[in-house]
Amino acid sequence: MNRDALTRTQAIIIVIVVVIAVIATLIYYAGLFGAATTPKPTPDYILIGGTADLTGPNAFVERIFVYGWKWAVDKINKQGGIYVREYNKKIPVKLIYYDDASDMSKAVSNMETLILKDNVLCMIGKMGPLAASATIPLAERYRVPTFGLAYYPDESVIKSKYYWSQPFESYEQHSSVLFSAINELKLETNRKVAILIMEDPLTTKFFDYYKETAKKYGFNIVYMEPFTILTSDYTVMITKMKESDAEVLIFLGIAPDAVTFWRQCKILNYRPKIALIVLGARTYGWVESMGKDGEYVCTLDFWHPTYPFRVAKYHATCKELAESWEKDTGEKWDSSLAEAADSIFIFADAIEMAGFLDREKVNEAMARVEGEYLSGYLKFIDRHLPVPDVLMQWQGGEKRIVWAPRDVPISIETPIAFPLPPWS
Amino acid sequence: MAALVSIQKVSKNFGGVWALRDVSFDIEEGEIVGLVGPNGAGKTTLVKICMNYLKPSSGFIKYRGLKITGLSPHKTCKLGISMTNQIPKVFKRMTCFENVLVGCIYGAGLKRNEAEKEAERILNMVSLSQKKHTISGELTIFEQKLLDLAVALSTNPKFLMLDEPLAGSTEKEIVQLVSIIKKLRDQEITILWIEHVLSEVVTYSDKIVVLNEGRKILEGKPHEVVNDKRFIEAYVGEEIA
Amino acid sequence: MELAGDPMISPTLFLQLLFNGVLLGGLYALLGSGLSLCFGVMKFFNVLHGSLTLLSCYFTYSIFSLVGLDPLLTSLILIPAYFFLGFFLRRYLIGRLRTFDDILIVGFSLTIVLKNIVLFIWGARPRGVYTSYSMLAIGIIGDIRVPLIYLTCFTISLIGLISLHLILKKTFLGMAIRAVAQDPETASAFGVNPSLIKDLTFGISLSFIALSGTLMSTIYNFDPSLEVLFLIKAISVVVLGGLGSVLGTLVGGVVLGLAECFAGIAGAQYQAFVGAIIFLIIVLIKPKGLFGVYAE
Amino acid sequence: MKGWSNLSSNRTKLLSILLTSCIIVVIPWVLRGYPTLFLLQLAMNIAFAQSWNLCFSYAGLLSLGHALFVGIGGYSAVAICNGGIPIHISILVGAFISTFFAVVISPLFMRLRGVYFAIGTMILCSSFQYWFMHWTEAGRALGLRLRFYPEYSLESCYYFSWLVAFFATTLSWITVRSRLGLAARAVRDDVDRSEGIGVPSLLVRTVIFAISAFMAGMVGGVRVAYLLVVDPSVFSFELSLWATLAVVLGGAGTLIGPILGGALITLLQHVLMGLPEISMLITGIMLILIRLFLPGGLVSIIKKASLLLGVCRRWLLS
């Protein structure tokens, strides 16, 4: 033994000290968390937990989401909060949200922390593209009503008990808008369609849906390819589209890709009669990146500040939401705002209908929620809230509605510009 | 009896420049052979070829009658061949003891406890036992040199190549190193002693080989070599240049 | 997909791809040259490469949208600015890091910080620089059309690379850099201060980053998550072309550009993948052959 | 390790390990909920950091694509478990598959030295990410989901991950103290010299790499058991990066370093959760500051503390 070795007494002293320290810590934490798990007599807040990508690849969209949540929470709190029958009074809402950087393991960690540490009543989040796989089991396990994002219909959402999909498009309606618009507006094309779809968990199903809807509406898909996000050269694809003489173009991809693609279309002088760029041209970044060349490109969206819908109870209107966003950030409106605000309003209604701050009861009440929200008249179908897409077109640097399905009660003021004029 | 090491027509070409050209000589068991020559004569290249760090462009090396060229260095080492380096190469983030221990375990193939005893013995021999637990990167250059020698010895070599052990040492240090080399001779380790400085090599070696510009120009008893005209030319020529 | 049309490619498409590949390659070469210089001379693997390129894109964007200055002119401001940034960064931060651990941890931490600073200042929205000539194309030989912006970027890249080559070969500074790359100790014996040379080299390396960032911003949309992509592309170029020479970098860039363009024939989803595959093949076949230093 | 040797004798070392194990076993029963979650993540980080540490600190292999083995372990575990094999065995088999993979790529990758090895592994890992994104059998971008796993609970995952963390630490400890560890350190310091004294350097590095891959594979399996799903983002560069940061901040080249570093990283993530917009910014700045003002890693604090303890002890004895 070397001379530095501890004697038995010292070892015992150290062990005793450590044990005492550990026990003290245990008692402290047990007290802390024990207290947190027992329901308080009158809670100060109704806690809603959220997880969003604030620093990762989807940060752009999800930061808008967070703004929408906050805006809706503000609106509710301005009216004193949500009326809860259990306590016979209005209780304000508090939103706690964490950053997940679109990383699945972080999103799960965030949600579990929200449940276990913050003891939230319900959860909300876009959950990245992996809503279906990682977060549903979590919601089920802890029996927490959770509002995620999924195209209708998503099998795993339908099968779940606590997971609900936020207002979002349905695959079928989404993939049929352009075709039915062309048919209804009687636009002359050769009915040859070229489709490019990015590889992404949410969008892969579109291959099948586009095939189906094209057939149904009498279109002929002459070219269809998947591509990877951040592709730098589209020459082969564009040339093949040109060679197959497709007059209808559908491009489903995020902004950087859409911009690169559309620029190369011009360079290679490919001009379809009508072009639908689904995600990439949805935001106002499109005109900034494309200038005049982005004009007359169509895109899909399910909300517009001119929508006549409102949430009367909390005095929330579409116009107000868009204006508030534009004032606070200096950026143009985005439909994600409505999506996010609606989710909070729907939660609020479910909580009010439940009358108790109890996860089970709120979850039961969710199914009964129906009514007018910012993105329209919403009602759960198979745990989804499908909202209809309308066709919009970039005209004069603004996004204008040019066609809407019959069941969407909005007036269309702008006629569609067709066909696309030749490249300037 | 055949020579312990036999170097046969070894040539080495580095991108068009001949570092070695048809060098052949033998080393008998128990001998100390001095390998001398001016800078850039190809001495270190020859050692590296013996150790199989480098592949010769042509020719080969026999050890105890076996051709060893083409083996990997660690297999060469297992045969009983070892070397020291001109700039000491030790494992800088390990203690001196560990440095030597690696060689004892892997080079000499000893069991752990035997290896530890052997490592102690070797460190004692190079008088580094005081620094046993020092991280070797913190040693002085001379101590690193000693440690490098100890590491080379730890593999229990039969044939040891010393690459300029005395270069850059003070006189006192030279005395210490030479005494170690004498001890090695007493242990019947065959030594190939490469040196730029002559006096010690000439004193202690049994044979001297002179390289110049990649060619062997002389081989023979130390005193014959030193007085040879070609040898003087090679060295004097260098001094003039 | 079964609908992808016939797998044969027409001569027009082939030539078009060839043009695009080579032009894109020039830009990639410029992106890689900064890393190559840094790596070759300082033996320093600059993990900040991607973030700094991205930052340069954002600076170009801001100057363009606030002042309306042409992005190509912006580079004239950014190049000296980045040079000094690099000089001082190396002198006061990176040059002080001794161990490999330090460089690694500080480098990667800085990438995290830079990315979040970008997020903080510019937000997460994808940005793009749209100029009046962004989408012009010149038609040559039949249906083949060459984008003007690609051509401009390629020309500027080429000028940049040639001037780098000249700096390295003809000037005293270049000789000093090459000497330091080979053997810092010997260089210092000849009166060259290796530390200063390294500071300067890092500055030059960063000014090439500035230039490539500016050019990138005119072609692509960018958002804060693009830094890793830039870094990986630069690494691919460097490894493909080797550290040996400016010419090597150019070759590496062109190989990568061509590979990306032609991979589209096999299917669009392979494009991002192909650089990595080529990289791995080269690394596995010739691990040493492609890695030289600024020697000769 | 060194920091511990003068802190405690073998007996106290054993005692403290026993005590820690007891506390770890008891915690989910005493503190339900959040602390369990926190410690679960901590254990996973420790295990992965240990795996990386073994590679980097003891064999000089700077792998920036270590998530590769986590991914392979995870995907294999899911695939095997979905075939009807119990999860425990699946994780083990998955780990063996990633070991096997490490052995296969070793002869090619061990030729790369220093930074080249780092770049090579980094690019290999990202090509795997692309590959799995497009591999239909592996569920493309959606990844694979664990279909059959009835005994799932937070507690079981907690014990799983601590088991792996303990296993990784013990395995590292055994490896480092063995003759293999000695040889690996020699190879790390000087490949040529170690060859010259009889160390088969390629073999040594391959074995260390394989052991490290085994640990990482286990981490992958446990990760799947916890998340119930594995997708191509498991190969992301960030995952490898966190291991690097954890080890270097904790103190590379020690066994306690990765434990401290893993704890620090987990703590940072959880403490800064409340500032979602700037949490990563603060994390980055914190990492730089820690590095600049505590160059030896967190271990150096322990060393200082142990010195202090030594002084106290001497004072008590006199």
Image (cartoon, coloured by chain):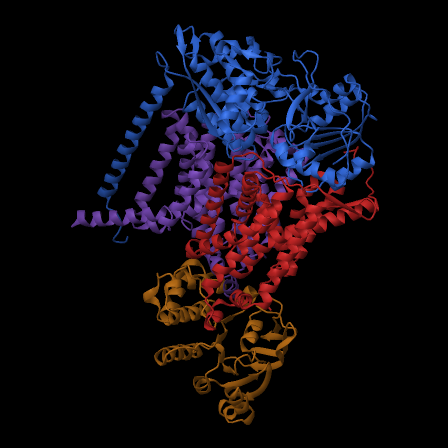
The image shows residue D64 at horizontal and vertical percentages of: 53, 47
Q: Nearer the viewer, residue C76 or B155?
A: C76
Where A213 sits versus B164, above or below? above
Chain with blue colouring: A
Where C66 sits versus C43, above or below? above
Could you say which quadrant of the image residue C229 lies in?
A: top right
All told, the count of numbered labels is 0
Where A419 sits versus D100, above or below? above
Query: Which of the image's four quarters has the C terminus of chain A?
Result: top right
- As drawn, is B166 to the left or to the right of C161? left
Q: Nearer the viewer, residue C5 or A36?
A: C5
Q: Residue at x 38, y 51 (%)?
A: D295
- As drawn, is C266 to the left or to the right of D242? right
Please, which residue is most extreme toward the left here?
D318
Chain D colour is: purple
The image shows residue A376 at horizontal and vertical percentages of: 60, 13
The answer, for residue C209, to whether it is visible in the render is no
The answer, for residue A37, to whether it is visible in the render is yes
The image shows residue D45 at horizontal and vertical percentages of: 46, 38
- As drawn, is A103 to the left or to the right of B168? right
The image shows residue B241 at horizontal and vertical percentages of: 53, 86
Could you say which quadrant of the image residue B4 lies in?
A: bottom right
Where C12 sits versus A209, above or below? below
Chain C colour is: red
Q: Nearer the viewer, residue C9 or C78?
A: C78
Chain with orange colouring: B
Q: Nearer the viewer, residue A142 or A306?
A: A306
